Amino acid sequence: MNFSFTGKNLAVSQEVKDHAEKRMGRLARLFPENVEVSVTFSVVKQENKVEVSIPLSGRVLRAEVAGDDMFTAIDGVVDVLDRQRTKYKSQLRDRARRNAAFKNELHLVFSDEAHDDDVADEIVIERMKQFPLKPMEPEEAVMEMELLGHNFYVFRTPAFEVNVVYKRKNGAYGLICPNDPADCL
């Protein structure tokens, strides 16, 4: 694993970097040797936050944990990444069982040396909803979302493209559109 450390609003000490490398070392044997790991340390409103991104083929494992101190946050982010890795690996296994073309992807993403005895989490779709999409502007979709009390809303633009608006953690709103975002507004 190749680590890239960044500090926002603080200088990252060597002790913190060493602890992060040591804790993430338990994950190192499960990923290819040349995987790039981006670790960002920040302090926001007296909370220590650690963000880690690990790009894999076609997917990015990302975790963000805030804690009382950096060491606690590092431990938490490693646990989250381990759960995500397990879930992703089981998804690849299920896909490989269904389609032989994906069998190679499983071996490319995860090291052959890693033996994982975790129980695979199955994805169960518990409920399906169907509703008509009426054309509207993103601002109108945000109002509809707020009226319903949801944190996302699917709608169709006047150009008949399906978009999604969602509420972000900081209270702002986001827009997901299938094409260039400039075309959506």
Image (cartoon, grey):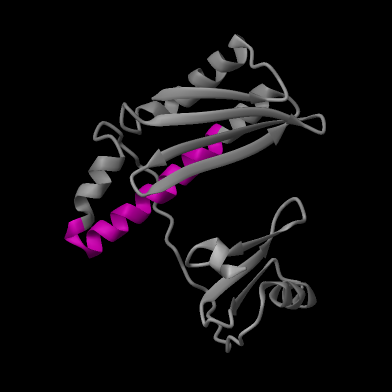
Using residue 70 as the reference point, say whether residue 113 is left or right of it. left
Which residues fall within the magenta stretch? 78-101
Q: Is residue 89 above or below residue 99?
A: above
Which image quadrant is residue 185 in?
bottom right
User: In the image shown, does 157 or 86 lie closer to the viewer?
Assistant: 157
In this rendering, the count of numbered labels is 0
93 part of magenta stretch: yes
Give how far across and how far down residue 26 sits, in percent: 43, 26
Give how far across and how far down residue 6 sits, in percent: 58, 24
Residue 176: tell me if it is visible: yes
User: In the image shown, does 100 or 14 lie closer to the viewer?
Assistant: 14
Residue at 35 percent across and 33 percent down: it is 30
Q: Is residue 76 above or below residue 163?
A: above
Which image quadrant is residue 100 in?
bottom left
Which image quadrant is residue 45 in?
top right
Q: Which residue of the protein is positioned furthest toward the front in this rendering? A: 182
Residue 119: tell me if it is visible: no
Q: Which residue of the protein is positioned furthest toward the top in this rendering? A: 14
Q: Quadrant of the N terminus?
A: top left
Residue at 36 percent across and 31 percent down: it is 35
141 part of magenta stretch: no
Using residue 171 as the reference point, say whether residue 165 is left or right of it. left
Give how far across and how far down residue 29 sits, in percent: 35, 27
Give how far across and how far down residue 112 sits, in percent: 24, 35
Residue at 70 percent across and 56 percent down: it is 168
Using residue 40 as the reference point, say whether residue 36 is left or right of it. left
Q: Is residue 58 above or below residue 176?
A: above
Q: Is residue 4 above or below residue 100?
A: above
Residue at 64 percent across and 67 percent down: it is 165
Q: Which residue of the protein is positioned furthest toward the right in this rendering? A: 45
User: In the image shown, does 151 or 67 lie closer to the viewer?
Assistant: 151
